Image (spheres, rainbow, N blue to C red):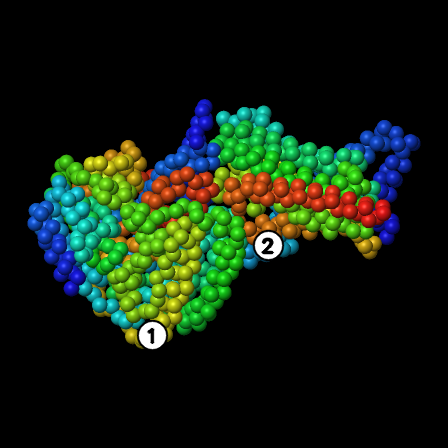
């Protein structure tokens, strides 16, 4: 029942931000383009009767032809959940930072930057968080080349040989 | 209040430091003993679990989840297998659900005991530390009886649970549950009731309700700031809607309440386990799951109430035997964000205590 | 019993009688050397026994086994540890102030030797019978502050420096209530001489006349020797090991010896001033009584250490300046008042 209210709100929001509404395994997904993200998130935060005002998670996602930033929104006052997906280009992945809305996005955006190379405009301290500062490449992208197994075996043989 | 001709001391705490709970590192600016800036540096235990998941099959990834929050490994297994089950639409047998609840809540108790112990240790209460570890040992023994290992238990499977607890498990569990009130009294007596402890923890590191919500804090830390939110109640997963338990909430917002709320949660966990033991039906412990797990194309997000915060798994499946993307939402990784904000202006001692009450486990923070 | 009681005095007299003139310079010098050796042996033995005892008590309070592998019930553990420490490489950090760095542990170790020299271990058994015993004791023990600061500064390590600074703040603050708590006893006995003070406790130990002073002394004494709950100087959760962070091998061992020596010295003074020193029922020799009393206080200190968590740094200062100091002044006032009433009643 509540899901219907939420669904209605999401559809209203979707028309405002040129988004698409999808559904997968019981969850409502709102797909928007990167420039609309702040408007979408603010809108979702202020839904009149089912506010999705708690940023639960934020992560990157590589779909080969484009990247996505996935926001899992929920609320501390109800069971409503909304998944917002922002489509960013692969070549020039730039999106507005959500830290202005939720301070909690700080580390999460740094992680997405670290793993996918997505630049968050307006982030207070956009640096790599897990990998070291001069690390090259973005490990969770699909085109990231992990060390081929032959290379690793060479190292292994050398260590075992000694 | 800076005096002229003084200089701030830049202190590098960690990754090798007695109170950094593993390999956490923070660069601290000190004005005398007062902290003026904290810069947490993560990644010393980063193993790239999300990347590893992409080259493992769905079942192969279960043992890796043990290494997330290694103090409550059944819970991580549980979160992951439930996510996969949700994606595949598998119904699991009743008995398995009850066993999962029992092991999950045991893990919660063990994790909270370690939290109490390590908080005690971080303010030099050595004896309280050894008391809590002494009692946690009994939970580890119960793990060992059932699953064969003590820390990284790897007990859950997609579709059920790996092993039926042996006959000696149930009396051990009963004895443990009966002894727990006495244990808690002991912790309170030696540690939390102590005047010095209260001086060290009360009114230190205030995390206001608004800030907690804004910072996406979850778990006991959130509830100690006066927010009544627990996934087990708000969006019940597994069979939590069948049990009668309370969500402990405290409004002190300080280090002391963040510690005390763990004691309350142990009491509630005991209640849940008692009900689960009473109601557990006979039956199979594994559902009929195909040998090769091949979920349909789609994506699913599932979150559970981990002892330290909410643990979420976001799995994107492309219809093959390996996930296209596994996203782990670690609770303490996000909770740790409060440290540079809340701990400012306190003494370096208090920062250590605040960090302890966050109960960060670096396996989960660094993934 | 009389023989046993005066055993050491008889031995001393025997040694002196080996010389033609028992009070010649050479005889005195020999006795001084022997006394010196005895004090060193006391410190080393105290450290060896106390470290093991500490670990046993720790195990007992926190319900674990403690050392139990080496020798019968693990009694040789500290000896093995000491041997291991001697074999360790002595590292001086590159950036250290070498002279200060090296000299600090020696000072820390030598101070308890100097203080223990004035304690009367039995009737007439003070190695040095100083008229200003208490005064000397407090003056010497105050120097250890400097040694800790030297270690902290000389190591050129930020944790050491923080620890050194804490040591200065803490030890200077607690020096004052410590001193004031002893003044009541001095007022009653009209003497700084430790021997006289023990003699004055023939009928009634001063802990009964000065209970408040005793409590203040124990608290301030704990802080003075940096024992938990006042071990902020070497708080390993915050400043790793404080001034000792950079020390290795025997130098670090010297700090350890110094710490346990200081603890013995503070307990010995407490036993002398408040518990009646070697005075006790005659079924045990005086020096046994003395060490029993010291042992009780040391046990109490260890018990406290393994029970209480560490105090906060501002509470530490608060306790010293706002609680202990006024209380000790009050105690001096009450003592004076009591002495006046006593004189009034007795003197008519």
Mark 1 burial class by Cα count in 10 Å: few <14, some 14-19, many 20+: few
- Nearer to us of marks 1 and 2 is 1
- The quadrant of the rendering that contains the C terminus of chain A is top left
Both labels 1 and 2 in a single chain: no
- The quadrant of the rendering that contains the N terminus of chain A is bottom left
Label 1: which secondary element = helix
Q: Residue at x 29, y 34 (%)?
A: A133
Relative side of C193 to C112, left or right: right
Residue B252 % position (x, y) = 40, 52
Label 2: which secondary element = loop
Q: Residue at x 60, y 35 (%)?
A: C172
Residue B16 % position (x, y) = 43, 40
* Dot 1 and dot 2 residues touching (CB under 8 Å): no
Please identify the quarter of the rendering in which residue B113 is found: bottom left
Q: Residue at x 23, y 59 (%)?
A: A79
Residue A81: image tag: none
Position of residue C288 relative to residue B109, above or below, is above
Relative side of B60 to C52, left or right: left
To which chain does the residue with label 1 belong? B
Residue C68: image tag: 2
Name of the residue lying farthest toward the right: C20
Can residue B295 be seen here?
A: no
Mark 1 to mark 2 CA distance (whole Å): 46 Å
Residue A135 % position (x, y) = 27, 35
Question: Which residue corresponds to mark 1?
Answer: B279
Relative side of B105 to C162, left or right: left
Can residue C213 be seen here?
A: yes
Please identify the quarter of the rendering in which residue B303 is found: bottom left
Residue B199 % position (x, y) = 50, 48
């Amino acid at each position: 029942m509540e899901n219907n209210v939420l669904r209605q709100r999401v559809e209203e929001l979707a028309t405002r931000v040129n988004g698409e509404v999808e559904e997968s395994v019981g969850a409502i997904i709102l797909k928007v383009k990167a420039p609309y993200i702040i408007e979408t998130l603010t809108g979702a935060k202020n839904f009149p009767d089912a506010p999705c005002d708690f940023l639960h998670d934020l992560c990157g996602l590589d779909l080969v032809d484009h990247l996505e930033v996935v926001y899992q929104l929920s609320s501390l006052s109800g069971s409503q959940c909304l998944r917002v997906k922002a489509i960013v280009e692969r070549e020039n992945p730039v999106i507005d930072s959500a830290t202005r809305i939720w301070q909690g996005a700080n580390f999460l955006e740094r992680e997405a930057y670290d793993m996918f190379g997505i630049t968050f405009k307006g982030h207070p301290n956009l640096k790599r968080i897990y990998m070291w500062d001069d690390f090259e490449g973005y490990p969770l992208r699909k085109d990231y080349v992990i060390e081929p197994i032959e290379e690793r075996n060479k190292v292994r043989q050398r260590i075992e040989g000694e | 209040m800076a005096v002229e001709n003084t200089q701030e001391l830049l202190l590098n705490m960690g990754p090798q430091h007695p109170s950094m709970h593993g390999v956490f590192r923070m660069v601290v600016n000190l004005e005398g003993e007062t902290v003026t800036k904290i810069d947490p540096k993560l990644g010393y235990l980063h193993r790239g679990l999300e990347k590893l998941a992409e080259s493992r099959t769905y079942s192969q990834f279960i043992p890796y989840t043990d290494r997330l929050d290694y103090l409550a490994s059944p819970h991580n297994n549980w979160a992951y297998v439930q996510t996969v089950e949700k994606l595949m639409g598998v119904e699991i047998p009743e008995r398995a659900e009850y066993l999962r609840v029992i092991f999950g809540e045991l893990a919660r108790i063990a994790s909270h005991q370690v939290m109490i112990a390590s908080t005690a240790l971080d303010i030099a209460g050595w004896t309280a530390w050894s008391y809590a570890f002494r009692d946690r040992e009994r939970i580890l023994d119960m793990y060992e009886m059932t699953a064969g290992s003590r820390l990284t238990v790897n007990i859950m499977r997609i579709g059920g649970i790996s092993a039926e607890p042996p006959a000696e498990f149930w009396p051990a569990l009963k004895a443990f549950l009966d002894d727990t009130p006495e244990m808690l009294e002991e912790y309170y007596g030696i540690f939390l009731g102590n005047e010095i402890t209260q001086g060290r923890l009360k009114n230190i590191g205030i995390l206001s309700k608004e800030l907690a919500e804004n910072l996406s804090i979850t778990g006991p830390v959130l509830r100690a700031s006066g927010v009544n939110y627990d996934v087990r109640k708000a969006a019940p997963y597994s069979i939590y809607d069948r049990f009668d338990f309370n969500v402990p909430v405290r409004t002190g917002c300080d280090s002391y309440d963040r510690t005390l709320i763990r004691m309350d949660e142990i009491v509630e966990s005991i209640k849940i386990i008692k009900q689960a033991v009473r109601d557990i039906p006979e039956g199979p412990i594994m559902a009929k799951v195909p040998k090769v797990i091949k979920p349909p194309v789609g994506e699913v997000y599932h979150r559970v109430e981990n002892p330290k915060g909410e643990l979420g798994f976001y799995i994107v499946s492309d219809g093959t035997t390996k996930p296209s993307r596994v996203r782990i939402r670690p609770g303490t990784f996000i909770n740790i964000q409060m440290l540079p904000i809340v701990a400012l202006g306190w003494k370096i001692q208090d920062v250590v205590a605040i960090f302890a009450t966050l109960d960060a486990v670096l396996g989960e923070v660094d993934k | 019993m009389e023989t046993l009681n005066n055993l050491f005095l008889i031995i001393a007299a025997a040694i002196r009688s080996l010389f033609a003139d028992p009070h010649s310079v050479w005889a005195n010098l020999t006795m001084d050397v022997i006394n010196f050796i005895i004090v060193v042996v006391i410190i080393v033995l105290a450290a060896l026994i106390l470290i093991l005892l500490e670990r046993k008590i720790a195990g007992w309070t926190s319900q674990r086994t403690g050392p139990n592998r080496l020798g019968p019930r693990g009694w040789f553990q500290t000896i093995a540890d000491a041997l291991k420490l001697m074999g360790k490489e002595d590292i001086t950090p590159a950036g250290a102030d070498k002279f200060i760095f090296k000299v600090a542990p020696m000072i820390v170790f030598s101070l308890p030797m100097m203080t223990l020299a004035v304690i009367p271990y039995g009737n007439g058994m003070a190695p040095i019978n100083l008229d200003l015993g208490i005064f000397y004791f407090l003056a010497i023990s105050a120097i250890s502050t400097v040694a800790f600061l030297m270690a902290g500064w000389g190591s050129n390590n930020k944790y050491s420096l923080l620890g050194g600074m804490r040591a200065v703040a803490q030890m200077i603050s607690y020096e004052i209530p410590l001193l004031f708590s002893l003044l009541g006893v001095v007022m009653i006995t009209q003497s700084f001489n430790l021997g006289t003070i023990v003699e004055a406790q023939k009928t009634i130990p001063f802990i009964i006349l000065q209970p408040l002073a005793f409590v203040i002394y124990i608290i301030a004494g704990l802080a003075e020797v940096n024992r938990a709950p006042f071990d902020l100087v070497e708080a390993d959760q915050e400043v790793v090991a404080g001034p000792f962070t950079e020390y290795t091998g025997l130098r670090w061992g010297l700090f350890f010896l110094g710490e346990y020596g200081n603890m013995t010295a503070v307990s010995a003074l407490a036993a002398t001033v408040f518990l009646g020193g070697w005075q006790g029922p005659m079924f045990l020799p005086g020096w046994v009584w003395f060490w029993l009393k010291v042992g009780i206080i040391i046990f109490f200190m260890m018990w406290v250490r393994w029970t209480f968590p560490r105090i906060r740094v501002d509470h530490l200062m608060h306790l010293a300046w706002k609680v202990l100091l006024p209380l000790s002044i009050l105690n001096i006032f009450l003592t004076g008042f009591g002495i006046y009433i006593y004189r009034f009643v007795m003197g008519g």
